[in-house]
């Protein structure tokens, strides 16, 4: 419809609200993770249970610092209690509050963006890849072109090529909703109201681990996105996404 | 033709927003915690108001089976007798030496019959046992079994006045926190004196700790010694969460 006219104003506004929220969410999420950089699967995980993996991102990583564990029951393998004997790095009160404030800034405009994109035809005509574009030879040709660094020049908006469409669709329809749902699954109040939500992801700690993995995927997306913007013509792309063409 | 359509749609949206606004206003808590102009506290308040407005008030958290019990870290104050350097710490040491036989929970404020409860008196009130997940703000979780008296039973015993809106808690380790009445009267909100079938261990807040299952772990105050029923919000000053940069509402 308006393919030649660059990004619609509401798309540009949504883009920068989303970008700012994502940046704040990524930084504060990292700060929150620093308090306990261990990830688990299932409902439960703590310093007295084995981790799926640990991240060396703060001094809380792989520490000792617990007094002698006392079993709750007189049987082998009984769960234990142990007291922490050291001060951990735990300055994330501000990070958590800012994380949820940024989440509000992402979720409310994000929901409006989804409604607008769905009913205004933006997703159908610009973002969602068509079956013809998804034919393996077409996709393959685009992949090879990108790998050989034959980047198409900036168009300042739609139309997007099939790799862009797949990347944007994955973020808009998979990664972002997954991020919101796994985040909500970690809320004790939301988990009480919707008991199926943490279960859907296999438990609280699984939801936390998926939340972290989706964060890594989104950070990689942003890196590639910024590189491609620069490679295809930074000035034109930035003008198109800010003041418009 | 097009203009008419636009106006109609706009009217529909305005009417829709107004009715949603009406519903929200009807369910909003009558008193919101202070923000002191702090942007982060405004975000906390937005979440609190949204939860109170959109989520059912009495939903229960998931309860587990005995086979689901897990190891349970004790963090924060793990022994008030050692780490509390005040008269309260000294008093706690004496109470602990006497197996808490002389311990009393003071319940006062906006109640009809202010009084104190011994541990034996609390155990005579109706009891509830639940196996729930503790969710620490740091990111870890643990499942424990808690036995105690529902806070609502204690509040019934003293008779809270109709103007009351908050329950303020004081602990031995000089922490002050508060709950609104929706949380205070929730059936899974306990003053717990038992854990995993035994007495509540000292590292987990003996003799009595709060269990507040729909919020983060740090709201489940350990070493509770005093309850004050209040009409107005009390941020606890420098002993409370807000002025230390931590959220008051952590249903998240």
Image: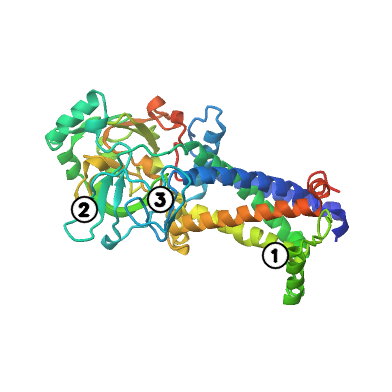
Name the residue carrying label 2. Answer: A72
Chain of the residue displaying label 2: A
- Report how far apart the C-alphas of labels 1 and 2 lie in the structure: 52 Å
Name the residue carrying label 3. Answer: B58
On screen, residue A85 versus residue B138, left or right, reads left
Name the residue carrying label 1. Answer: A166
Q: Residues within 10 Å of mark 1 (few under 14, many from 20)?
A: some
- Report how far apart the C-alphas of labels 3 and 1 lie in the structure: 43 Å
Disc 3 with disc 1 on a shared chain: no
Quadrant in the picture for the N terminus of chain B: bottom right
Depth check, front residue: B248 or A19: A19
| Percent of width and height locating residue A227 | 72, 53
Instruction: Indicate whether A224 appears above or below B43.
Output: below
Q: Is residue B106 visible?
A: no
Q: Compare marks 1 and 2 and give the one earlier in the sequence.
A: 2
- Report how far apart the C-alphas of labels 2 and 3 lie in the structure: 31 Å
Name the element at disc 3: loop
């Amino acid at each position: 419809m308006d393919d030649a006219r660059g990004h619609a104003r509401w798309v540009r506004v949504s883009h920068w609200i989303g970008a700012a929220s994502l940046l704040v969410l990524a930084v504060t999420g990292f700060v929150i993770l620093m308090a306990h950089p261990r990830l688990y699967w299932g409902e439960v995980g703590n310093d007295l249970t084995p981790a799926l993996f640990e991240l060396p991102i703060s001094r809380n990583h792989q520490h000792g610092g617990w007094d002698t564990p006392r079993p709750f029951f007189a049987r082998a393998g009984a769960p234990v209690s142990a007291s922490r004997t050291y001060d951990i790095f735990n300055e994330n009160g501000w990070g958590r509050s800012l994380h949820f404030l940024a989440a509000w800034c992402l979720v409310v405009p994000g929901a409006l963006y989804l409604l607008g994109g769905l009913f205004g035809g933006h997703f159908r005509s610009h973002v969602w890849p068509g079956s013809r574009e998804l034919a393996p030879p077409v996709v393959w040709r685009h992949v090879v072109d990108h790998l050989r660094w034959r980047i198409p020049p900036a168009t300042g908006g739609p139309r997007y090529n099939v790799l862009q469409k797949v990347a944007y669709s994955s973020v808009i329809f998979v990664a972002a909703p997954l991020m919101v749902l796994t985040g909500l699954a970690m809320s004790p109040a939301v988990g009480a109201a919707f008991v199926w939500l943490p279960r859907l992801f296999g438990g609280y700690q699984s939801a936390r681990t998926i939340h972290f993995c989706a964060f890594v995927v989104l950070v990689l997306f942003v890196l590639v996105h910024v590189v491609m913007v620069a490679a295809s013509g930074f000035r034109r792309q930035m003008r198109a996404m800010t003041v418009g063409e | 033709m097009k203009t008419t359509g636009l106006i109609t749609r706009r009217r529909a949206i305005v009417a829709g927003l107004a009715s949603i606004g009406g519903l929200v206003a009807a369910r909003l808590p009558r008193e919101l915690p202070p923000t002191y102009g702090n942007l982060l506290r405004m975000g906390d308040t937005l979440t609190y108001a949204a939860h109170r407005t959109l989520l059912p008030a009495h939903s229960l958290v998931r309860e587990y089976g005995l086979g689901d019990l897990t190891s349970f870290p004790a963090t924060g104050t793990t022994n008030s007798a050692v780490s509390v350097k005040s008269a309260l710490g000294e008093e706690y040491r004496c109470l602990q030496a006497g197996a808490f036989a002389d311990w009393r929970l003071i319940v006062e404020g906006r109640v009809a019959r202010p009084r104190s409860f011994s541990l034996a008196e609390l155990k005579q009130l109706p009891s509830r046992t639940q196996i729930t997940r503790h969710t620490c703000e740091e990111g870890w979780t643990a499942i424990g079994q808690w036995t105690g008296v529902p806070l609502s039973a204690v509040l019934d015993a003293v008779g809270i006045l109709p103007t009351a809106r908050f329950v303020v808690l004081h602990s031995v380790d000089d922490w002050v926190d508060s709950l609104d009445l929706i949380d205070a009267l929730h059936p899974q909100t306990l003053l717990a004196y038992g854990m995993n079938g035994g007495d509540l261990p000292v590292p987990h807040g003996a003799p009595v700790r709060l269990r507040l299952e729909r919020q983060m772990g740090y709201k489940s105050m350990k070493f509770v010694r005093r309850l004050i029923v209040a009409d107005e919000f009390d941020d606890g000053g420098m002993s409370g969460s807000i002025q230390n940069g931590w959220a008051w509402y952590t249903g998240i």
